[in-house]
Image (cartoon, rainbow, N blue to C red):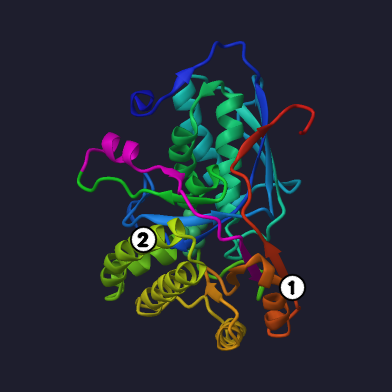
């Protein structure tokens, strides 16, 4: 069934039954917030992100003909609860595409703190999509892999690509098959802005409310959701133009207003979802001060209290110094644009 919805071409049955992939997280400058279809993971709006060169996830998938169940480890520990359930559901999808029924042994190593609003699900499902497709012998191009990764976690669709990527929401009111085909990510042409994202890790612990639940509550109850979704469409048009002309100040201004608007939708949900902490606000004050001091620096926040500050790479150390003492344990990292998800050969390269 699903084979007709994408460019799947099953390979002969004797292809490699084991594959390892690496993917990096991405940070959205135009946010994905709100699903119009929870099963297919179709968003209400397009989003746009930068893939990072830090915090890679490495995932190995090996088919096990003798196993009755998938065996999944996350950082060496058996994956339990929701995380394990999502990975197994994703493998079911890959099995459907491949026509193979074998269970898999999955070993995932994350270097990003899981669940801290630093997009471990994006790198995680991007790496899993690439490794699982290869292990199960299905030949998908990057577009089709981004559709597949989307089914694990929406933001994962963008980590298939390096640098800047846009994830299309796809046509509304279409059939399931058309909607699935229309919702994929692709690279965004940009002039060189030599960007850095300075990541202020305000809190690396797991979040109290999952992004899935927070999105659902926002879409269902927030009177600000629809106005934000409408303005986000305009933000995307402006963002593409700003990236195309290499205007970092405009890119930053649009990203900051889009993120603050997304958080406003959550604050207006019933009950409110508030990921931002007092330390987040202190970092935001430092970013404003940097701009007053003529350093172009702009903030964005996801489903957590951490702040990512967009600036020129040449200003990154100054920006990091400006925010460091506002971060409780002083964890500040500098990231640049990174590679898209890719397979490693068996030697680990
Ligand atoms: O991790 P996901 O795919 O459930 O979505 C997270 C969405 C945000 O990180 C808050 C925004 C985005 O576009 O990445």
Q: Which residues are magenta?
A: 174-200
Is disc 2 placed on a helix, strand or loop? helix
Q: Is residue 43 above or below residue 9?
A: below
Q: Residue furthest right?
A: 347
Is the distance from the Cβ of mark 1 to the nearest ligand 1 atom less than 8 Å?
no
Is disc 1 placed on a helix, strand or loop? loop
- 1 vs 2, front mark: 2
The answer to whether residue 254 is magenta is no
Image-based side of 3 in relation to 63, left or right: left
Neighbour tally class for label 1: few under 14, some 14-19, many 20 plus, Cα within 10 Å: some
Numbered badge on residue 331: 1
Residue at coordinates 55% horizontally, 37% vertically from top-left?
129
Q: Position of residue 122 (x, y in %)?
A: 55, 51
First of labels 1, 2 by sequence position: 2
Q: Position of residue 41 (x, y in %)?
A: 39, 48
Residue 211 in view in this figure: no
Q: 145 or 137: nearer the eye?
A: 145
Q: 188 or 116: nearer the eye?
A: 188
Examine the image and state in which quarter residue 206 appears: bottom right
Q: Is residue 181 above or below residue 302?
A: above
Q: 88 or 120: nearer the eye?
A: 120
Number of numbered discs overlaid on the protein picture: 2
Numbered badge on residue 236: 2
Q: Is residue 92 above or below residue 239?
A: above
Image-based side of 65 in relation to 2, left or right: right
Residue at coordinates 44% horizontally, 43% vertically from top-left?
186
Residue at coordinates 38% horizontally, 28% vertically from top-left?
6
Q: CA distance from mark 1 to mark 2?
A: 31 Å
Q: Position of residue 93 (x, y in %)?
A: 46, 33
């Amino acid at each position: 069934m699903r084979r007709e919805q994408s460019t799947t071409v099953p390979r002969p049955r004797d292809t490699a039954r084991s594959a390892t992939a690496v993917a990096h997280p991405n940070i959205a400058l135009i946010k994905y917030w709100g699903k119009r279809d929870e099963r297919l993971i179709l968003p209400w709006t397009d989003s746009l992100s930068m893939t990072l060169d830090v915090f890679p996830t490495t995932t190995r998938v090996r088919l096990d003909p003798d196993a009755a169940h998938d065996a999944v480890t996350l950082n060496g520990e058996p994956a339990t609860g929701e995380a394990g359930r999502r990975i197994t559901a994703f493998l079911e999808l890959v099995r459907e595409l491949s026509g193979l029924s074998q269970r898999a042994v999955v070993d995932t190593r994350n270097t990003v703190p899981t669940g801290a609003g630093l997009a471990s699900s994006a790198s995680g499902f991007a790496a899993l999509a690439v490794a699982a497709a290869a292990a199960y012998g299905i030949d998908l191009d990057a577009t089709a892999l981004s559709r597949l990764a989307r089914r694990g976690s929406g933001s994962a669709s963008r980590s298939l690509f390096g640098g800047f990527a846009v994830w299309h929401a796809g046509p509304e009111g279409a059939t399931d098959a058309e909607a699935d085909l229309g919702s994929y990510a692709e690279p965004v042409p940009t002039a060189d802005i030599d960007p850095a994202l300075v990541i202020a890790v305000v809190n690396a612990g797991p979040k109290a409310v999952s992004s899935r639940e927070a999105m659902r509550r926002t879409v269902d109850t927030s009177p600000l959701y629809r106005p934000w979704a409408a303005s986000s469409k305009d933000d995307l048009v402006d963002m593409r133009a700003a990236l195309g002309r290499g205007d970092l100040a405009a890119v930053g201004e649009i990203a900051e207003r889009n993120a603050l608007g997304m958080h406003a939708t959550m604050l207006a949900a019933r009950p409110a979802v508030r990921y931002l902490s007092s330390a987040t606000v202190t970092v935001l004050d430092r970013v404003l001060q940097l701009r007053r001091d003529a350093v172009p620096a702009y903030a964005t926040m996801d489903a957590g209290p951490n702040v990512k500050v967009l600036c020129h790479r040449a200003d990154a150390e100054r920006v990091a110094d400006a925010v460091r003492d506002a971060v409780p344990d002083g964890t500040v990292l500098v990231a640049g644009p990174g590679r898209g998800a890719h397979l490693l050969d068996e030697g680990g390269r």
